[in-house]
Image (cartoon, helix red, strand yellow):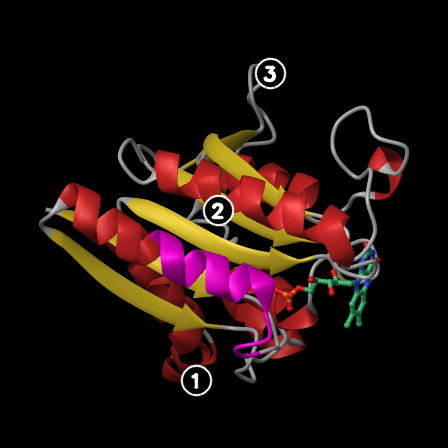
Amino acid sequence: MKKILAVQGSPRGERSHSRRLVEAFLQAYAAEQGDTQLLRREVGRADLPHISEAWIAAAFHPQPDQRPLAMQADLALSDELVDELFAADRLVISAPMYNFGIPSGLKAWVDQIVRIGRTFDFTPDDPESQYKPRVLGKKALIVTTRGDRGYGSGGVNAHLNHADVYLRAVLGLIGIIDVTVIAVENDEFGGLAFEASFRAAESALAELAARF
Ligand SMILES: Cc1cc2nc3c(=O)[nH]c(=O)nc-3n(C[C@H](O)[C@H](O)[C@H](O)COP(=O)(O)O)c2cc1C
């Protein structure tokens, strides 16, 4: 049985295109793959805490197994989110583009799950690789939506895209390198341009559901 973790990043509810596309994908995925388990983590409409000075001190404690109880408490939510990630075989993220990046709730989630000693190791003396990922053998899907157009590779606004490109980078740091990105553009313009982009994403997601 495959376990799929859905991280919804849009602050919008039913009006969110990325959220609706992810919901449709999850339905298609369950229908295609049969025995699946869905785990959900809302981050767009939840108040996930930013990391704090106390969080940093706890996460970077030189002897993690000696952390005092107060420090363990500072990392409790992060531990929960990391455990969720490890429990999943597949990760699906809805990620609207906000100010060329991602919404702050989704960024807060990223900061909680990119954890030294848990999701990656830092080995500065290793000349081969200073970063060792720990989250191995998983696939991710990023469904991203944008108001403007041309943010894809080779597009006129590609240099401004710090949304899915950024997510791909941080997922790679922790070991998730098999990442599919499906994007919808033109939300600000609407009309046929948006319709065509949305329909293309729907088709791509329906096709992906069988092999993800
Ligand atoms: C605060 C905010 C910032 C945005 N910044 C950008 C941006 O930098 N570039 C862009 O193309 N669209 C931008 N948009 C448009 C959204 O990416 C677009 O409406 C998208 O469909 C939102 O995702 P959702 O439909 O899943 O909620 C922004 C929208 C909001 C509300």
Question: Is residue 7 in sight in this rendering?
Answer: yes
The amino acid type of the residue labelled 3 equals Pro
Q: Which is closer to the viewer, label 3 or label 2? A: 2
- How far across and down, in percent of the image, does residue 31 sit? 18, 50
Specify the segment rendered in magenta: 13-25
Is residue 16 within the magenta segment? yes
Check the picture and name the quadrant holding the C terminus.
top left
The image's mark for residue 70 is 1
Q: Residue at x 55, y 46 (%)?
A: 199
- How far across and down, in percent of the image, does residue 55 sit? 56, 73
Q: Residue at x 48, y 57 (%)?
A: 21
The amino acid type of the residue labelled 2 equals Glu
First in sequence, mark 3 or 2: give its number. 3
- Answer left or right for 14 relative to 87: right
The residue identified by callout 3 is 127
- How far across and down, in percent of the image, does residue 155 sit? 83, 30
The residue identified by callout 2 is 202
- Answer left or right for 170 relative to 3: right
In this view, the residue in front, 160 or 201, is 201
First in sequence, mark 1 or 3: give its number. 1
Task: Note whether 211 is above or below 1 in the view shown.
Answer: above
Q: Which is closer to the viewer, label 2 or label 1? A: 2
Q: Quadrant of ligand 1?
A: bottom right
SS majority, magenta: helix
Marks 2,1: beta carbons within 8 A = no
- Neighbour class for label 1 at 10 Å: few (<14), some, many (≥20)? few
Q: Quadrant of residue 84?
A: bottom left
The amino acid type of the residue labelled 1 equals Ala
Badge 3 element: loop
In this view, the residue in front, 114 or 122, is 114
